[in-house]
Image: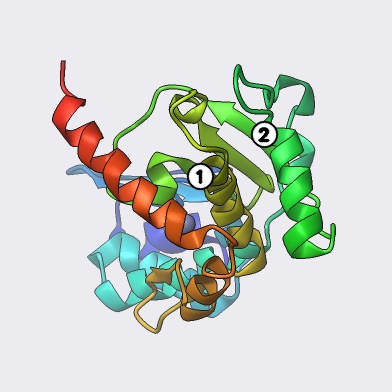
């Protein structure tokens, strides 16, 4: 199906369709009086008629059910997408002032994962404050197989077990894939994830430290 001409036929508007390859926004629709401006991820160009029909119905009517279908489909697509070839390994910085992330990752890999995980790791700057720990202290990019750790943890106040725990948590995101509910929402920290997380040797200590650390952060965080 040709999405553009189908949309033009049904809306009787001029359709400007851009196909992109960004992961973040897979569909956006802007309606003016005489035209529809649509930006669409390339994954929909090769999708089934059923999915393309949902795209069209979302563009025309902002149909809720269509949007759900699109989201589920896109999530499944990105789950499988592999962008590791885009990763410039030379630009990764894993040696910090206090901690060598690569060493930590390799060690955890041997202890907990039989050395089977093939992941990259780097420090990142500019902490963006977000609600959840894995976004604050670290993150895992599943398309790049890349663990990113906030460089505010490269500090003498951070116990070795804690930085290990944060890296371990992010590695688990590779092992325990998220599940997608019927509503299209992603469940990131599944039951099996949490179970594996507790297998970390210093789990309790890490939890305790995190509590204290976050409290301090609240008290002294503003300047
Ligand atoms: Zn997490």
Tell which of 43 and 183 is nearer to you.
183
Q: Quadrant of the N terminus?
A: bottom right
Where disc 1 sits, the SS reads: helix
Residue 45 appears in which quarter of the rendering? bottom right
Where is residue 145 shown, x and y percent of the image?
69, 48
Q: Which residue is mark 2?
A: 101
Q: Is residue 97 above or below residue 177?
A: above
Q: Is residue 128 above or below residue 81?
A: above
Residue at the spot 47% in from the left edge and 33% down from the top edge = 158
Tell which of 222 and 173 is nearer to you.
222
| Mark 1 Cβ inside 8 Å of ligand 1 | no
Where disc 2 sits, the SS reads: helix
Residue at the spot 68% in from the left edge and 27% down from the top edge = 94
Q: Is residue 165 above or below residue 138?
A: below
Spot the residue most to the bottom: 182
CA–CA distance between discs 2 and 1? 12 Å
Where is residue 14 shown, x and y percent of the image?
34, 46
Q: How is the image coloured?
A: rainbow
Neighbour class for label 2 at 10 Å: few (<14), some, many (≥20)?
A: many
Residue 10 appears in which quarter of the rendering? bottom left
| Mark 2 Cβ inside 8 Å of ligand 1 | no
């Amino acid at each position: 199906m040709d999405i553009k001409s189908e949309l033009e036929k049904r809306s009787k508007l001029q359709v400007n369709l851009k196909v992109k390859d960004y992961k973040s926004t897979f569909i956006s629709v802007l309606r003016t009086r005489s035209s529809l401006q649509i930006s669409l991820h390339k994954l929909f160009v090769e999708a089934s008629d059923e999915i393309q029909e949902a795209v069209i119905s979302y563009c025309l009517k902002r149909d809720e059910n269509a949007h759900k279908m699109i989201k589920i489909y896109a999530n499944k697509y990105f789950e499988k997408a592999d962008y590791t070839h885009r990763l410039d390994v030379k630009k990764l910085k894993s040696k910090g002032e206090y901690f060598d992330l690569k060493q930590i990752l390799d060690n955890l890999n041997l202890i907990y994962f039989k050395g089977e995980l093939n992941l990259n790791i780097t420090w990142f700057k500019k902490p963006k404050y977000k609600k959840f720990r894995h976004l604050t202290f670290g993150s895992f990019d599943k398309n790049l197989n890349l663990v990113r750790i906030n460089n505010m943890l490269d500090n003498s106040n951070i116990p070795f077990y804690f930085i290990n725990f944060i890296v371990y948590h992010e590695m688990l995101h590779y092992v325990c894939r998220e599940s997608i509910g019927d509503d299209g929402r992603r469940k990131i920290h599944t039951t099996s994830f949490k179970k594996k997380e507790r297998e970390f040797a210093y789990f309790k200590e890490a939890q305790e430290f995190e509590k204290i650390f976050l409290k301090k952060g609240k008290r002294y965080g503003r300047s």
